[in-house]
Image: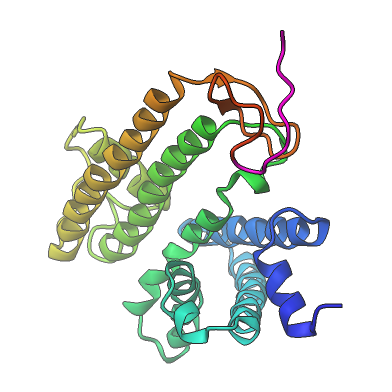
Amino acid sequence: MLPNREKIDFYLTDLETTVGKIISITISLLVLVSSGIFVAETYDISEDTRLELRVLDNCVLIIFAGEYLLRLWSTKDRIKYILSFYAIIDLISILPSFIGLVNISFIRLLRWFRILRLLRFIDKKFLTVSIINQDRIIFARILFTLFAIVFVFSGLIYQVEHPVNPKSFDTFLDAFYFSIVTMTTVGFGDVIPISELGRLLTVLMILTGVALIPWQIGDLIRRLVKTANQVETVCQRCGLAFHDGDAGFCKRCGKQLIIDQ
């Protein structure tokens, strides 16, 4: 039997066992729910509905805070965990809500980064399909990266521009439209930020897209070039799809390969 601390750490990071998958799926759904609440709050809704959404978001926040504390408590190297990329994203996603209680509104801009928590689960072992090649995983990461960039910056630009430019940025959809038009370099010019911070965020959005997307596409191209000299022989244990032509065993898990004659 694993000690309780080790067991909690295992299930919080595991993506293969039933318990690990349930935890991962639950957290992913809560991230989507929280992101949906953020979007809904940008529209003209009744005060009763807005109150209900805030209560729901507070419940999600408590769960996220509990999860972060559990990860921090159960990990062996806490300093390493605190400084890790995913821990920083987790902290950014919950801290603004608590700081927001004292009305530091500019800190609450960081709440839009909560969608980045899903990066942890863009992994082959988490997918419901047991056999999927690495190329599709990389492609999924590219799509999610693009969506995350647009979503996060749309939220940031909305919160910055809406108070000073409500006609152009009335709802999240207006900011989302602006981000898509900007990222695709179409640039209709019908919606533009007027504040200095809004323009700065636009520049950062463009630079982020220019830096991240080609890098991930390059990773996909390198993968395609590498697999061009391999044959498709799917491992029955781990699902790795491509191996060297003369390989008899999977290079990832060591299981004997079944070669079709």
Q: Magenta stretch: dominant SS?
A: loop
Q: Is residue 258 above or below residue 103?
A: above
- The quadrant of the image that shows the N terminus is bottom right
Q: Residue 129 or 194: which is nearer the viewer? A: 129
Q: How is the image coloured?
A: rainbow
Number of numbered markers = 0
- Given the current orientation, which residue lies at the most extreme right position? 1
Where residue 204 appears, x then y in whole percent?
Answer: 20, 55
Does the magenta-highlighted stretch encompass residue 204? no
Q: Residue 47 or 155: which is nearer the viewer? A: 155
Q: Is residue 63 above or below residue 172?
A: below
Q: Give the residues drawn in magenta, as a range.
A: 252-261
Where residue 8 appears, x then y in whole percent?
Answer: 73, 76
- The quadrant of the image that shows the C terminus is top right
Where residue 124 appears, x then y in whole percent?
Answer: 61, 43
Q: Is residue 171 above or below residue 63?
A: above
Image point (50%, 72%), residue name = 90
- Given the current orientation, which residue lies at the most extreme bottom position? 102
Q: Which quarter of the figure has residue 216?
A: top left
Q: Residue 118 or 250: which is nearer the viewer? A: 250
Image point (29%, 41%), residue name = 215
Q: Is residue 93 left or right of residue 217?
A: right
Q: Is residue 186 left or right of residue 145?
A: left
Q: Residue 31 or 177: which is nearer the viewer? A: 31
